[in-house]
């Protein structure tokens, strides 16, 4: 019964704070005081509680800083990071994918590579296999297959037995991710699995044509660079960056005059079509020059002319878009070193601004769509980051990424 003497109907928590009665806790008492202060027309941050309570004071400071035009510690300017911690970051071997992450969204790099916040995996809640896990399956299949049955000549043809073995490996790799619980809902996995197998089954014909056209054969798969085979890039000013990684595949002509490093891509070609304008896409695509330098470090003078290519493995990729890349010449290396120096300086300077990227359908942003730290950033992330871009400490990042100050002014907070 709603009219019983023991029952009180409260419209909301905020309504209860403004209503009669006694506070049920010290926290509620303080909230009532703050609410009454605000309702009386006073600025809440001037309330004695806001001034004297360190945690509350910090909250107000954060709100004001994030709304300002200055790049502050509340926005990712970590200039107070202990020097020893920063030195350990810039002194260790860096992967091209982590550096690409900084070029796209420095805050994501901060969480992943500085704080080393682990990505939370919840396989039970997956609807379908993630793009990363799908790519891992395809990479694993192709690495195993080429390692087992490396063609001896550019014109070698894959036999029926080879093709059967490739399919068997693909089925084994699919079964592995099933057992790990990474495939999502059974119906959607059946669709994804069929797509993976179609892509894999198309590989032998594509590989045969590629080798015939280029005159190369595989000489290594999953070639590790860094460590005992150091890749050190001089970025000027007495600074150098040490790099590490794994090359999916290294191909070479029988006469040793040509070498091609391959990075398999299982997704779309979108974002890879303007390499002729900027081979490293403002730092967002660094793998090709890194792997070319790694191949040279491994093979020495015998490497010859090194080309780097992305190989898009989807069966429905248009043939003209399947292989994208370039020869890593002096011009490419110069641009690569310039961009690498900017990224290195940004990391060393504690520049970790959140950059959501272009808005997407459904209210998401390009850099946030697959980001494991998406929930950390607020709903007004685009507006807040755009307001900061005129700050002088971000000049190098703005010049690199070509983002524009104030570009988030029209964004909704919703």
Image (cartoon, helix red, strand yellow):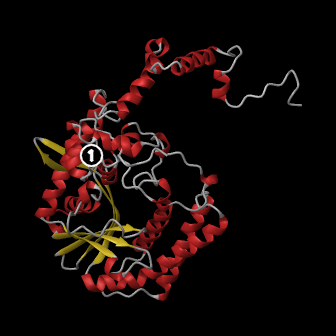
Depicted 199 relative to depicted 383: above or below: below
Image quadrant assignment for residue 393: top left
Task: Please state the horizontal and vertical placement of residue 413, each as a whole percent of the image.
Answer: 46, 44
Depicted 231 relative to depicted 255: above or below: above
Image quadrant assignment for residue 192: bottom right
Horizontal arrangement in the rendering, residue 129 relative to residue 336 (left or right): right
Horizontal arrangement in the rendering, residue 281 relative to residue 354 (left or right): left
Task: Please state the horizontal and vertical placement of residue 343, each as a whole percent of the image.
Answer: 24, 46
User: Which residue position is annotated with label 1?
Assistant: 405
At 20% across and 52% down in the image, what residue appears?
Answer: 339
Image quadrant assignment for residue 395: top left
Label 1, secondary structure: give it. Answer: loop
Horizontal arrangement in the rendering, residue 32 relative to residue 224 (left or right): right
At 12% across and 63% down in the image, what residue appears?
Answer: 331
Task: Please state the horizontal and vertical placement of residue 322, each as a whole percent of the image.
Answer: 34, 77
Depicted 25 relative to depicted 154: above or below: above
Front-lying residue, 64 or 308: 64
Front-lying residue, 65 or 177: 65
């Amino acid at each position: 019964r709603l009219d019983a003497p023991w029952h009180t109907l409260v419209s909301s928590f905020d309504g209860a704070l403004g209503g009669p009665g006694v506070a049920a806790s010290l926290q509620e008492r303080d909230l009532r005081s703050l609410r009454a202060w605000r309702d009386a027309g006073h600025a809440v941050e001037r309330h004695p509680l806001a001034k004297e309570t360190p945690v509350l004071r910090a909250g107000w400071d954060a709100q004001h800083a994030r709304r300002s035009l200055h790049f502050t510690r509340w926005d990712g300017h970590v200039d107070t990071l202990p020097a020893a911690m920063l030195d350990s970051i810039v002194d260790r071997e860096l992967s091209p994918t982590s550096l690409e992450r900084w070029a796209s969204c420095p805050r994501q790099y901060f969480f992943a590579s500085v704080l080393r916040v682990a990505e939370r995996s919840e396989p039970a809640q997956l609807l379908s296999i993630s793009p990363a896990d799908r790519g891992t399956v395809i990479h694993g299949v192709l690495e195993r297959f080429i390692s087992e049955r490396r063609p001896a000549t550019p014109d070698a043809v894959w036999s029926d037995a080879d093709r059967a073995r490739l399919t068997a490996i693909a089925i084994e790799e699919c079964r592995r991710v099933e057992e790990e619980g990474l495939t999502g809902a059974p119906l959607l996995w059946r669709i994804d699995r069929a797509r993976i197998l179609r892509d894999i089954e198309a590989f032998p014909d594509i590989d045969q044509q590629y080798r015939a056209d280029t005159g190369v054969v595989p000489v290594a798969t999953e070639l590790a660079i860094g460590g005992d085979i150091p890749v050190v890039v001089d970025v000027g000013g007495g600074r150098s960056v040490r790099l590490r990684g794994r090359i999916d595949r290294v191909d070479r002509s029988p006469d040793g005059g040509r070498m091609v490093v391959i990075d398999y891509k299982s997704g779309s070609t979108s974002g890879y079509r303007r390499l002729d304008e900027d081979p490293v896409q403002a730092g967002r695509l660094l793998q090709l020059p890194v792997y070319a330098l790694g191949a040279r470090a491994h093979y020495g003078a015998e490497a010859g002319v090194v080309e780097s290519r992305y190989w898009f493995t989807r069966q429905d990729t248009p043939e003209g878009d399947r292989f994208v890349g370039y020869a890593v010449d002096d011009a490419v290396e110069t641009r690569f070193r310039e961009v690498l120096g900017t990224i290195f300086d940004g990391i060393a300077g504690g520049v970790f601004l959140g950059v959501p990227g272009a808005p997407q359908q459904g209210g998401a942003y390009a850099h946030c769509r697959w980001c494991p730290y998406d929930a950390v950033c607020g709903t007004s992330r685009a507006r807040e980051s755009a307001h900061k871009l005129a700050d002088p400490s971000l000049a190098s990042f703005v010049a690199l990424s070509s983002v524009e100050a104030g570009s988030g002014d029209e964004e909704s907070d919703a």
